[in-house]
Image (cartoon, rainbow, N blue to C red):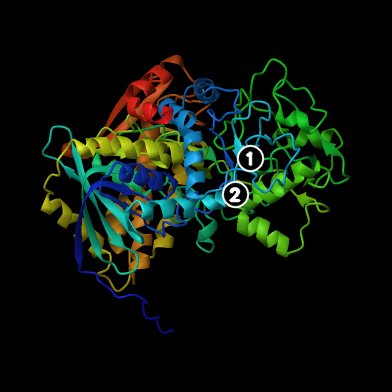
């Protein structure tokens, strides 16, 4: 069959150099907010995005709730209370700094979004009289109706509004450009980041970005354990191209990571999966839908103490003696603050008690406002469900006033995942940060999914804006350094080498090989022997098979560079697993050679980083579980100017 002609001009040998004050890598939610913050400081700001910024990133297509608006006028929970609840829910394995920023500034970002044109209120008065609506502010609340710190929002309006604001502020946006490496000044005692390189996914043109400050705002790693050759688009819950480029770049440059040993059994997507939020369930978007069995018998909701909730309204209110509860995005499997929905009850117990499969989500039995807000707001605004669920089901004739939605898989979940099929889901590992959201490298900051224990849209927005203004302050006080031409040329040749072959291995087959190694040697149960075999096999892939990767056009070049990054992230994960010599319940981490669960001496963050000047040796460190210290005090020390401006 004749190969189609490439639609864009090929510029394999062209190099473009660009200088800026602040460089943002990744144009998702965090990246746009970082760019807006830096540009507001009057600095030249460049944003580099692999896709199209107007809709790119894990949150680009929408979100249904904003879980961190603790300072909104209706909230009965303080930022300190909410952050500490998040931390305790994960036995300390959480990012106290970034989540306090989220809780302290999340509502500020919502108000900013509204000024930009995003929709955050029930301005059409569709839900007047609903118990989740505040009549004065027109806010709609989700999950905990009594404490009101989580808002239902029209998240499909957010990304276009952010893009428009970036353009208005003069942010220079490089769409369709994949960042490939960080440029560092290795001659300094503490490595300094001087910029980054990139390649255009349509023309193959190579870019060199010089900067005074750089912010990593790219996605968390995916496609590590799960990948489908035939259906690559559903390989993970998040978009295919959101797969951890920033983690790989940072690891190679010597950035410090933590909690990368944590992985959960697969929950969403994957080759055998149904569309997320497309089957009967009570999770996040569908909270707190009623569930029934095959005979229409309702399955009970229970509170944290095991008491059956007798009304729909009770599902949204704390139980006696409980001030508030958590729900929505990043919640733990071991909740201290959360209600137990029907789908948390063991299937075997339900069957023994006379319930019959299949089970269904029962929207028709829900109160009118509850039914409408779940289907017409939550499902319609959540990015993963707006088109494939809300729009397609509607076109197929689904009517939430009459129809039940069947639950598949193991009775509740969207697919039957094997223990070895894992994901970096919930509150995963990532880059270690200080109170400026700075990494251990001078001039390099991180936000959103690049940070360890990252979360959802509100977390990305708050940390993005925060990192943007702190990086801008640093850029104002520093000068631009000359780049190491040899380092830049080495990266250009590495990228170009993939285009110099007429045959070889395709990127899909390479990705599949990585997932097989990770499933077999870094699955649910780990040991030193298994992990070392897996690491050796990944190193063999790197030395023997990477040179065989074959690309025919810039699109395949981007996909091939991605799978090389997936390989690097897989090695990072295995190295992290090797150094935690204890099992941990909250990290979902089991080592057969260290079976003791959560010994006190291992209740800490284990850190890893690559020492490039020492033959790529992995340096291991540790941080106290509460290394962030006093939340309110430290935040106010580092953000005096911001606090003053918000008061004014």
Q: Quadrant of the N terminus?
A: bottom left
Q: Which comes sooner in the sequence, label 1 or label 2?
A: 1
Label 1, label 2: how many angstroms apart (C-alpha)?
10 Å
Q: Are marks 1 and 2 in contact (CB under 8 Å)?
A: yes
- Callout 1 crowding tier (Cα within 10 Å): few <14, some 14–19, many ≥20: many
Q: State which mark lies toward you, 1 or 2.
A: 2
Residue in view at x 12 percent, y 36 percent: 188
Closer-to-camera residue (188/159): 159
Mark number, residue 284: 1
Residue 619 is left or right of residue 141, and the answer is: left
- The vertical placement of 524 against 606, above or below, is below
Q: Secondary structure at mark 1?
A: helix
| Above or below 321: residue 44 | below
* Whether residue 291 can be seen here: yes
Q: Position of residue 56 (x, y in %)?
A: 45, 55
| Residue visible at 31% across and 32% down in the picture | 608
Residue toward you, 155 or 166: 166
Residue 178 occupies quadrant:
bottom left
Q: Secondary structure at mark 2?
A: loop
**Quadrant in which the C terminus is drawn:** top left
Q: Which residue is mark 2?
A: 382
The image shows residue 532 at horizontal and vertical percentages of 36, 38
Residue 272: which quarter of the image? bottom right
Residue 617 shows in the view: no
Instruction: Using residue 292 as the reference point, say whether residue 647 is left or right of it.
Output: left
The answer to whether 557 appears left or right of 494 in the picture is right
């Amino acid at each position: 069959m004749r190969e189609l002609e490439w639609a864009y001009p090929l510029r394999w040998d062209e190099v473009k150099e660009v200088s800026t004050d602040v460089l943002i890598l990744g144009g998702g939610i965090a990246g746009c907010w970082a760019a807006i913050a830096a540009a507001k400081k009057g600095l030249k700001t460049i944003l580099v995005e692999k896709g199209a910024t107007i809709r790119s990133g894990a949150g680009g297509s929408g979100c249904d709730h904003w879980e961190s608006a603790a300072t909104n006028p209706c909230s009965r929970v303080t930022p300190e209370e909410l952050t500490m609840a998040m931390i305790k829910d994960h036995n300390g394995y959480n990012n106290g700094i970034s989540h306090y920023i989220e809780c302290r500034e999340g509502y500020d970002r919502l108000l900013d979004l509204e000024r930009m044109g995003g929709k955050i209120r029930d301005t059409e008065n569709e839900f007047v009289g609903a118990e989740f609506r505040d009549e004065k502010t027109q806010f709609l609340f989700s999950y905990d109706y009594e404490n009101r710190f989580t808002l239902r929002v029209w998240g499909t309006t957010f990304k276009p509004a952010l893009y428009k604001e970036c353009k208005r502020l003069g942010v220079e946006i490089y769409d369709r450009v994949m960042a490939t490496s960080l440029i560092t000044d290795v001659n300094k005692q503490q490595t300094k980041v001087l910029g980054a390189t990139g390649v255009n996914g349509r023309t193959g043109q190579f870019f060199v970005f010089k900067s005074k400050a750089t912010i990593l705002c790219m996605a968390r790693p995916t496609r590590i354990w799960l990948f489908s050759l035939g259906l690559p688009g559903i390989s993970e819950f998040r978009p295919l191209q959101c797969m951890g480029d920033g983690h790989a770049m940072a690891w190679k440059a010597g950035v410090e990571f933590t909690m990368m040993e944590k992985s959960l059994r697969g929950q969403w997507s994957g080759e055998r999966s149904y569309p997320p939020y497309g089957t009967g369930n009570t999770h996040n978007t569908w909270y707190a839908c009623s569930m029934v069995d095959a005979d229409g018998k309702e399955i009970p909701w229970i509170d944290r103490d095991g008491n059956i909730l007798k009304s729909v309204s009770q599902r949204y209110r704390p139980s006696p003696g409980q001030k508030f509860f958590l729900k929505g995005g990043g919640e733990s499997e071991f909740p201290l603050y959360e209600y137990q929905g029907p789908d948390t009850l063991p299937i075997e117990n339900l069957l023994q008690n006379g319930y019959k499969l299949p089970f269904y989500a029962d929207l028709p039995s829900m109160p009118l406002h509850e039914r409408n807000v779940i289907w017409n707001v939550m499902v319609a605004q959540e990015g993963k469900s707006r088109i494939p669920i809300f729009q397609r089901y509607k076109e197929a004739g689904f009517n939430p006033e009459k129809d039940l939605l069947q639950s598949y898989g193991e009775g509740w979940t969207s697919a039957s995942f094997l223990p070895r099929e894992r994901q970096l889901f919930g509150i995963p590992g990532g880059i270690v940060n200080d109170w400026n959201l700075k990494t251990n490298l001078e001039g390099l900051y991180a936000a959103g999914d690049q940070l360890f224990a990252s979360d959802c849209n509100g977390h990305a927005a708050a940390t993005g804006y925060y990192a943007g203004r702190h990086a801008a302050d640093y850029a104002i006080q520093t000068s631009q350094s000359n780049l190491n031409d040899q380092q830049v040329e080495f990266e250009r040749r590495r990228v170009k080498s993939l285009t110099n072959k007429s045959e070889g291995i395709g990127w899909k087959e390479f990705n599949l090989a990585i997932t097989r190694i990770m499933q077999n040697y870094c699955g649910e149960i780990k040991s030193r022997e298994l992990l070392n075999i897996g690491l050796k096999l990944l190193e063999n892939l790197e030395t023997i098979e990477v040179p065989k990767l074959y690309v025919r056009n810039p699109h395949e070049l981007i996909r091939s560079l991605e799978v090389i990054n997936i390989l690097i992230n897989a090695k990072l994960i295995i190295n992290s697993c090797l150094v935690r010599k204890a099992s941990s319940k909250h990290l979902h981490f089991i080592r057969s050679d260290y079976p003791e669960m959560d010994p006190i001496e291992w209740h800490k963050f284990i850190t890893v980083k690559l020492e490039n000047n020492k033959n790529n040796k992995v340096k291991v460190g540790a941080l106290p579980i509460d290394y962030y210290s006093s939340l309110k005090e430290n935040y106010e020390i580092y953000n005096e100017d911001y606090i003053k401006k918000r008061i004014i």
